[in-house]
Image: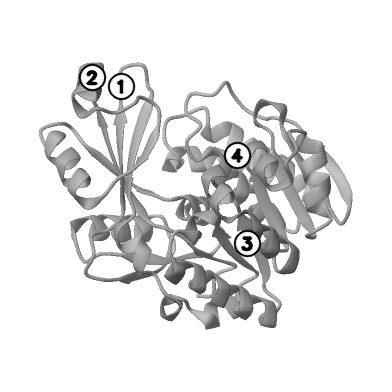
Amino acid sequence: MVPKVYGIGNPLIDIITQITEDDLEVLGLHKGTMHLIDEERRKELLSFISDKEIAYSCGGSCPNTIITLASLGVTAAIAGMVGLDEFSSIYKNRLQELSVFDKLSQCGAPTGSSIILITPDSERTMNTYLGANRLFSPNDISKSLIQKADFFHFTGYMWDTDSQKKSILAGISTAKKAGTKISFDIADPFAVSRNRLAFLDIIDEHADIVFANNEEARILFDNYDAYECVKSMGKLCQTAIVKNGKHGSFICNNGRIHAIPVKGKDPVDTTGAGDVYAAGFLLGLCRLLSPHDSGLLASYLAGEIIGQHGAQFSADKILSLTDYIESHF
């Protein structure tokens, strides 16, 4: 099977449990934030929640996008690095259930994880341990699959280590030679702050499609106006997208700017909304929709994901989404 979309990302096992406000205080965590943690802190948190009811799911920005695409019928592959532990088995088994083309490599380091602590007010406090992800290297990519794919997708989170960065640059080189479209989701304001010039170079020299939210775009172009940012980014790449929260999004394709309205429900949980938006846009392109209509599809799916908890749709929800997409797009 040849994937239409080949993604490289950081597979993280989401470890989700309910805790109290007092628990947060004991752990010394600031509610609603994301903390990067080391292995010692990870062990401490896992020990603390060991007697609680725990749910597991596949996480990570690029994996969320790839999983959504596969769930909606697009052949899609995810490459990344996991360990040889129980968490990698859970992750890989789940990918198989979701019909994702598993191209994950394995090593001796622990599988990356995000320990998500949910308080009674539904706030999520996230504790992310990169683990094995940091060891992904150019030897772990499948050049033949990139060459055969329609799209090569990656995110700004891959700039955490030189090894990950070299992997993406090798993937970009392979994609350009093969004519595979290059899709770049900036994904994180902190990544932009650390790598602004490198990201601008990727956008200008290599990317065909670029996704950014308003904060990421502001840092890139030193401008608080999302419309002006997408206009600036549209001068650097074929298709530029700036998501502007409750105000919708802008798409600049070959110099023409489209305003895309917000779709869907009042937000319950915005986790993964940007990842699902990217999946919706790429799904539209795979279905040969115009960039404008692909943006409407992306906005619809993003609106649906924020109306529920978690960054992935249930099997029942996928059936209703598929029916809607078939009748409206």
Tell me which numbered mark, 4 or 3, is placed earlier along the sequence: 3
The mark nearer the N terminus, 4 or 1, is: 1
Answer with mark 2 or mark 1, whichever residue precedes in sequence.
2
- Name the secondary structure under disc 4: helix
Picture disc at residue 301: 4
Disc assigned to residue 119 = 1
Question: In the rendered image, which residue does mark 3 sit on?
Answer: 198
Residue 16 percent location from the top left of the image:
28, 36
- Judged by depth in the image, the label closer to the viewer, 4 or 2, is 2
Seen in the picture, residue 17 relative to 97 is either above or below; the reply is above
Q: Please tell me which residue is depicted at 17% across the width and 41% down the height of the picture.
A: 46
Whether the residues at callouts 2 and 1 have beta carbons within 8 Å, the answer is yes
The label on residue 20 is 2
Residue positioned 67% across, 64% down in the render: 202
Say what amino acid the circle numbered 3 marks: Ala
How many C-alpha atoms fall within 10 Å of the one at disc 2: few (<14), some, or many (≥20)?
Answer: few
